[in-house]
Each structure stands twice: as structure tokens, then as C-alpha cells.
Amino acid sequence: MRRTLAALMLLFSVTLSAQKFGEMEPNRFTYISAGAAYPYVGVKAGYEIRQDVFIEVQALTDGGGIWKENVFNDWRSVSLIRALSLESLHSEFRAGMGIVQSEERLTNQRANSFGIAPQVGFTLLLHPKWAASSSITWPLSSASNLTPGILFSIEYRIGRYEKENGLH
């Protein structure tokens, strides 16, 4: 009787937790983030191409001509970001490098300036879909009046499952 009961419990627990009956836990994430930066307003989006490796697009503007004086160059960047998960703190440390582009003319400069943009950041996971994020990006370019963007934002995370070798 004990063997039959143990076999039935094992059978039900295996079938109820089998992957084909339940929803898969996400192993990749995409995020959209918007917030305030000094001296900019910024938005960024990231797509996880491999485990803990993101392609991130970021845009920062000083609101020139719209809500304040046009003092700093607006800029955009595309970066490759590596994330280090800190499970005990429910957070991630992110660092990477990218290409920065600015085309706004404030002084006597070329119309289209490219450079590099190292970035470091920290993300605190508040909920499986929401996080508080901060990052510092240094645009190194021949364009004048580019200042580092210190961005504090709220991040919305979209999880997805991608099959990897050995997982079914």
C-alpha cells in the first residue's frame, strides 16, 4: 500500500510540474526604461541576446528649445552591456561599452559626431516585472558640450523563454 501511494504521489507531482503542462520561467529579458538624468531626460531599451548580455539603445536630451535652453548636445548610444546578477541583493550590476552619436550643432563642430560611450549601472529588482535603475554613461566624442548622463529611471522588464542546449 505504501509503495502504491508513493508511486501515485510521484506520478501526480511529476505530471503537475512537467514543463509541457506549466508555463516556462523566463530565462531572457527585454527592458524599457525611462527617467530623469542630470542634465538630461533619458530613455533606454535593452534586449538580452545571451544570458546576462544585453544590447542597449539609449537616448538623452536636454530638452533644448522645448522646455529649457539648448545648452548641451543631445546624444544617442548603442551599447553591449554585461550584467552581473547579485541574487542576495535582488539586483544587477551592469557595465559595458558602446558607440555614441550626436548631430546637434551648438558650436563650430561637425554635423555628425561619433565616439565611444562606456557605461556602468545598477538595477534593483522591485518586482519580477519592475525595477529601479541607475546608470552613468560617459560620451567620449569630438562633439562639444557632451556631458556624462547620470540616469535614474524605472524599468519595465518583459520576460521570455528561449530554449538552450539541454533544456526542453
Image (spheres, grey):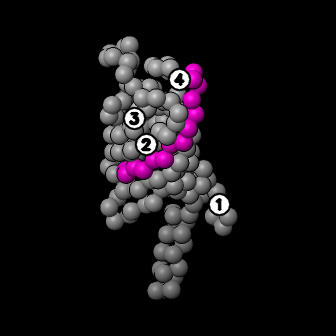
In the picture provided, is 86 more to the left or to the right than 96? left
* Tag 3 residue: 147
Q: CA distance from mark 1 to mark 4?
A: 48 Å
Circle nearer the N terminus (3, 1)? 3
Q: Give the image location of residue 148, x and y in percent.
A: 39, 38
Q: CA distance from mark 2 to mark 1?
A: 32 Å
* Tag 1 residue: 164
Q: Is residue 115 magenta?
A: yes
Which circle, 3 or 1, is nearer the viewer? 3
Circle nearer the N terminus (4, 2)? 4
Q: Give the image location of residue 134, x and y in percent.
A: 35, 45
Circle nearer the N terminus (3, 4)? 4
Q: Which residues are magenta?
A: 109-123
Residue, x 56% and y 57% (percent of image)? 51
* Tag 4 residue: 109
Residue type at mark 4: give it.
Answer: Gln
Label 3–label 4 contact, CB within 8 A: no
Q: Which mark is residue 23?
A: none
* Tag 2 residue: 137
Circle nearer the N terminus (3, 2)? 2
In the picture provided, is 45 more to the left or to the right than 152? right
* Helix, strand or loop for disc 3: loop
Residue type at mark 1: give it.
Answer: Glu
Q: Is residue 8 magenta?
A: no
Residue type at mark 3: give it.
Answer: Thr
Residue type at mark 2: give it.
Answer: Thr
* Helix, strand or loop for disc 1: loop
